[in-house]
Amino acid sequence: MANVLLVDDRPENLLALEAILEPLGQTLVCAHSGEDALRQLLRHDVAVILLDVQMPELDGFETAQLIKQRERTRHVPIIFVTAISKDEEQVFRGYSAGAVDYVFKPFNPEVLRSKVSVFIELHEKNKQLREQAEQLKEQELAELRRESEERYRFLAEAQPDQIWTALPKGELDYVNQRALDYFATSFPELVEAGWTQVVHPEDLGRMLDRWQIALATGESYENELRFRRASDGAYRWHLTRAIAMTDKNGAVVKWFGSNIDIHDQKRAEEAQRFLVEAGAVLAASLNYHSTLAAVARLAVPRIADWARVDVVEDGALRTLAVEHVDPKKIELAFELARRYPESPEAEQGPPLVLRTGKSELATEIGEERLAELAQDDFHLGLVRELGVQSYMCVPLVAHGEMLGVISLVSAESGRRYGPEDLALAEELARRVGTAVENAQLYREVEERAQAARVLETVGDGVFVADTNGVVRLWNRGAEAISGISRDDIVGHRFDELLPGWERVSTGAETMPFERDGRERWVSISGVEFDDGVVYAFQDITEERALEQIRQDLVATVSHELRTPLAAIYGSAMTLNRDDLELLTGIVNDLLLASQLDAGRLDVRIESCDARALTESVAEAARTHLPGGIRVALDPMDDGVPPVAADEAQLRQVLDNLLENAIKYSPAGGDVRLGVEAADGTVRFSVADAGLGIPASERDRIFEKFYRLDPDMTGGIGGTGLGLYIARELVRRVGGRIWVEPNDYEGSIFYVEIPAAGDNGMTHMGQKAAARR
Ligand code: ADP
């Protein structure tokens, strides 16, 4: 049904028009003025307008013009209706205003009706045509859409990845075959179950959370998820992405998604990361057992649900560490090991690996295999509880030796170990082996360094000579004893610097050597090893000297004591006073000599008056002179300076010389004592006219216990210590002592002592000399 707009300011005219057109059965819309007509046109879609020409205000022509100006109503046909404007000009104006017809009153109702119905028909036709065109367009669009959909599905099917699309609210509306194959399901089944059935339970929450956010915001979705592969039940990592297609208002029309298998890549990355971390753990500890336990901890849960490390001890395996994702199960594993110890002959697991030295991989352990391995029902129950699904055992080797076995087991994670996992485990074992080797090397180096430190601190001399006798090591003790520095001897044959030492091969020996012009003795022993000989030596000069003293003492003292002892025996009641003095003297000399040898004698150097000392010594001697002996003083110069010496000791030296002079002048005669200044020193002299000393013996008489032949001394007794002690005392204050022949007969002993400084104190040089 179409609308016909009737416009007339007179109601009776409108009524008449309505009556005429009613039989057409269309909707008649009436307007009472031009403005009213424009208003009605806004509301209704009109097929034809019957417009009265004469109207107050807006007349028919003006109204027609306005209608033609409007886009929506421009094509609506207008039939002017008039009773008066019949002249041509008016008619022309009507047509130019857009009229399609001009009818004059009174009009033939029949004609008017047929005219109006022509326009209605035209309008209907137009409308139909428009609708048909629209329909056609829609069909074409649908066709196009179908084609493009087909194209992208085709594209989607050709993809190696899983591709899917979903409706705005998330329901799947397409999944490519690739995905259906992976999940071994049909599209309706997948739609029914959704992703929740195929995603790893641990990833489910994360998947739902993010997908909800994406659906709510229309933002793109991305997630890394594990999807269960139907063929083997393995969960493989996928990168899932979806983006929303939106209409021009921004509303989501469709989601386009893909799941890309990134499992291998991810595992390679994880493996790499794991190995890096393992490296850090391995490098952190040098303790081999704690290192292995740390490795077990590291492996769980990254590459295993439980890990076990066994070490070889006395040819058998001992479980060192067990780690489990669930700590309660560790106890279970130990329990299992206790109750059902593995047979060393077992055809699987660590014992097999220990025997063959080769890794073992069990990708899938079915129920049947479990039952086969179990020794009884209880055993089977325990093993089942552990839920072993898959395992691998790899040998642990260091320095080419089997250290143990690392076992990695998959249980609750449902992971299946494949060749790549085995490669990772082997790489781990290799790194552990290297770490253990490093730790051992480090320990060896440490031990060596420790030994070197000890060598440096021992007082004994230690040196190592290679098979050619070239010194490779020379410790501080060796430097101190020998006086030979490391730099001078290392790299040289040791017999170049220590002649005769090459005789020492193994066993201990006592050898002399010269140091600072003095003879010293060492006890040295050598121990051979592959690359040469290690020698150790000790300075035994002192011990040797003591031993010598002991021997000499026995010889001398036994002779010297004979007389007083004989006296003691002879008259048990009384002891001769001289004997007693002699005995005391011997004992004192021995004591003093031993103190000098041991360097324990204190020397107190101070300024002493040389003249007064000389006079006092002569005075003392005169009190008990034997017959025929006189003690005389040489004239003394006033300019004799004081000496820097230990006065008591210097007195002892002079006493001793004077005593000897008297003693070795059995025929009597003059003994002369003198003192004079001599170039920074003071020289004392003791001259006698006694037995004299052969030139060849003049040095030797100063040696310890040295005495001239009894034939030359006329049987005069003594210990042979007096001159030795005198020389040592003089040497300690930086002086010297010697003997010369007396011009006529007998001998002259000289003692030269440094003069004291101006302020009466000793100077540094004398002090240093005193220490020698
Ligand atoms: P002793 O106890 O034998 O006197 P000394 O060490 O004092 O020991 O002297 C060593 C030796 O030197 C003496 O045994 C003696 O043979 C010789 N001697 C020392 N002084 C004289 C001297 N004035 N005249 C001759 N011989 C001497």
Image (spheres, helix red, strand yellow):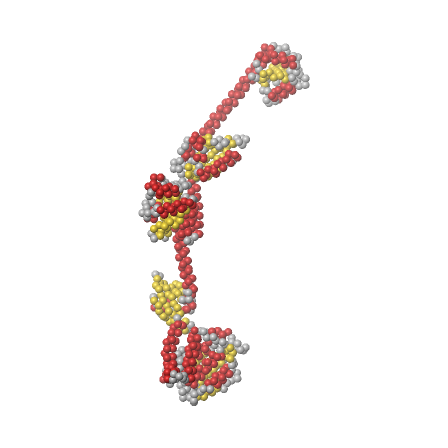
Q: Residue furthest front?
A: 573
Q: Quadrant of residue 488?
A: bottom left
Q: Is residue 46 left or right of residue 267?
A: right
Residue 59 seen in this snapshot? yes
Residue 712 seen in this snapshot? no
- Say if 434 sits above or below 751 in the image: above
Judge by depth and name the residue closer to the eye, 370 or 676.
370
Residue depicted at 59% across the width and 18% down the height: 46
- Say if 109 sits above or below 401 in the image: above
Judge by depth and name the residue closer to the eye, 234 or 64.
234
Q: Which quarter of the figure is the N terminus placed in?
A: top right
- Say if 651 sits above or below 240 in the image: below
Residue depicted at 52% across the width and 23% down the height: 134
Q: Is residue 105 left or right of residue 532?
A: right
Give the x, y percent position of residue 172. 46, 31
Q: How many marks?
A: 0
Residue depicted at 49% across the width and 78% down the height: 646
Q: Residue furthest right?
A: 56
Q: Is residue 586 left or right of residue 677?
A: left
Give the x, y percent position of residue 298. 43, 47
Q: Residue furthest left?
A: 345
Give the x, y percent position of residue 726. 44, 79
Give the x, y percent position of residue 545. 39, 74
Residue depicted at 44% across the width and 75% down the height: 595
Q: Residue furthest bottom?
A: 628
